[in-house]
Amino acid sequence: MSPAGIRSRITSLLPTRADLAQARRDPRRDLLAGLTVAVVALPLALGFGVSSGLGAEAGLATAVVAGALAAVFGGSHLQVSGPTGAMTVVLVPIVADHGPSGVLTVGLMAGVILVALALLRAGGSMRYVPAPVVEGFTLGIACVIGLQQVPNALGVPVPEGERVLVVAWRALEDFARDPGWASPALALAVAAVMLLGARWKPTVPFSILAVIAATVVVQVAGPDGVRPIGDLPAGLPAPSLAFLDAGALGGLLAPAVAVAALAALESLLSASVADGMTVGQRHDPDRELFGQGLANIAAPLFGGVPATGAIARTAVNVRSGATSKLASLAHAAVLAVIVFAAAPLVSRIPLAALAGVLLATAIRMVEAGSLRAMARATRSDALILVLTAVATLVLDLVQAVIIGLAVAGLLALRAVARQARLAPVPLDRGDHTEEEHELLAEHIVAYRIDGPLFFAAAHRFLLELTELADVRVVILRMSHVSVVDATGALVLKDVVAKLRRRGVVVMVSGIRPGHRRVLDSVGALELLRHEGREYATTPEAIGAARDHLERTGVLTTAPAPAREAP
């Protein structure tokens, strides 16, 4: 891409006057929606910051910086961005291997990758991710988030380890050796209030109410074993690149690609969910990637973790009546005020209360009705869903998505290959005697190829066609072929060559113009052209086959009966 093209492409991804005009339509409604989302987002930002291993302040910095930039530059008017559970799952092993500075470096690199994807117009690729992969991915993430909360919910230090199942089991062992019931009771109470309150009054932010109540109870009663968040800095740190280690960039490339892939997947999925909840709203996927890229470049400079579009907060934003990007921007501004003005109060929130918030969030991520419908759709869909969920839990998110996409692709290829058929074509018998009919049936076979002639189906044709016996002419009718790839073209060439070696003449009819280039590139038509065995229509090929049999003496035309003299 030329410099002028890059400049033009970047200009097309920047905010427009239409965005500003939409923000002016109903500012009061958007500001109220932003306040509501901020109240819901505060405990989530704190919890995900703690779960990531960088601390609550990292979650708040991400929610403020990334939330503001993604709101301004993103491609959705209703998207709310910040730290998420899915991203936390990816970050935990990075913290274990490379430390906090490695996470910040990975976030910066992932932001650059997302900007590059936006420039390359990769946003539209989200529509190729099958629904069972997304559902299995979400189910697996919910399980991982729930297991991550076990140590804080039990009030024990987080054990060492990268695998969430191992860490949760070690936390249970530590709790069994010295049980303390204050933290589990607090976590379960907060989760119960959130789940029951959401069913009773969905519009009320029960998460923040439950966290406030739990904090007050701990401050008044002071139960043993309940740990608070700890000291939080008042305000955001000055932007800095001190964490960046140029020598470590090569080793962090693979984690950065994984973080960028997850950020793109979750953000575009969240934007699609927002579109589905409204009428007339449609996001620009490339602009969304661009906004998320800028957000992830900036967040590490302030000590924040990588961010994505957040489905839960975006849904709250839509349900609260948001109409423009002003709501998401207001959410980030409210969180910034809390960071600067209420850090001492926030530092007293019990970790067990945040664990309860995230436990309830994990439970609410699982849509039982959607899972049942997907499992009942087809066996293939159920298999993809289960494999993706298990891989998410046992391996990691990126590997899980790759496995899900690979299995979905293989099953789709299998289904498409089964649609390809090789059917005999009945010959026109209108002008021939019974003896000629017998010869035609014995020496000429016409086949119509339906569907795709590609690598997953082509070899079956080779077996069927080369096993023909007592045939002098084979006619392949290709007007119904939908797709031809290099493998299909090579198999066709192989069929023609093998039949010719047996003395069988092969004729082809109805080749589509779009398929000629592939067939020519492997020399499949060369075997036919020099003998004139390619025809535009099937009747022409059948006529040529009859002429060939007559010339070779296989088929003879009966002489016309002589007339009697008058």
Image (spheres, rainbow, N blue to C red):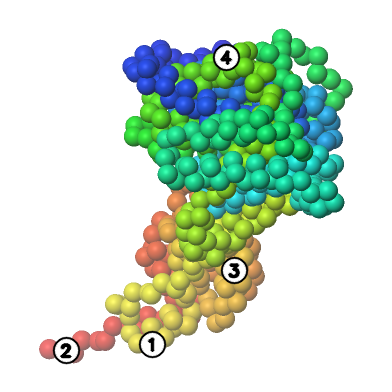
Mark 2 residue type: Ala
Q: CA distance from mark 3 to mark 1?
A: 33 Å
Report crowding for label 2: few under 14, some 14 to 19, many 20 or more residues within 10 A (C-alpha).
few
Mark 3: secondary structure: helix
Q: Secondary structure at mark 4?
A: helix
Residue where numbered disc 2 is placed: 565
Query: Is 231 above or below relative to 367?
Result: above
Mark 4 lies on residue: 337
Q: Along the line of sight, which residue is nearer the eye, 370 or 252?
A: 370
Q: Position of residue 224 (x, y in %)?
A: 76, 38
Q: CA distance from mark 2 to mark 1?
A: 29 Å
Drawn side of residue 1 relative to residue 283, left or right:
right
Residue farthest toward the right in the current orientation of the protein: 247
Of 273 and 38, which appears nearest the observer?
A: 38
Assess whether mark 1 and mark 2 are in contact (beta carbons under 8 angstroms).
Answer: no
What amino acid is labelled 3 in the image?
A: Arg
The amino acid type found where label 4 is placed reads: Val
Q: Which residue is mark 3?
A: 460
Q: CA distance from mark 3 to mark 4?
A: 67 Å
Residue that appears at 70% across and 51% down? 393
Q: Earlier in the sequence, mark 3 or mark 4?
A: 4
Say which amino acid is labelled 1: Glu
Q: How many marks?
A: 4
Rendered location of residue 179, percent (x, y): 79, 49
Residue 502, picture quadrant: bottom right
Label 4 vs label 2: CA separation?
Answer: 118 Å
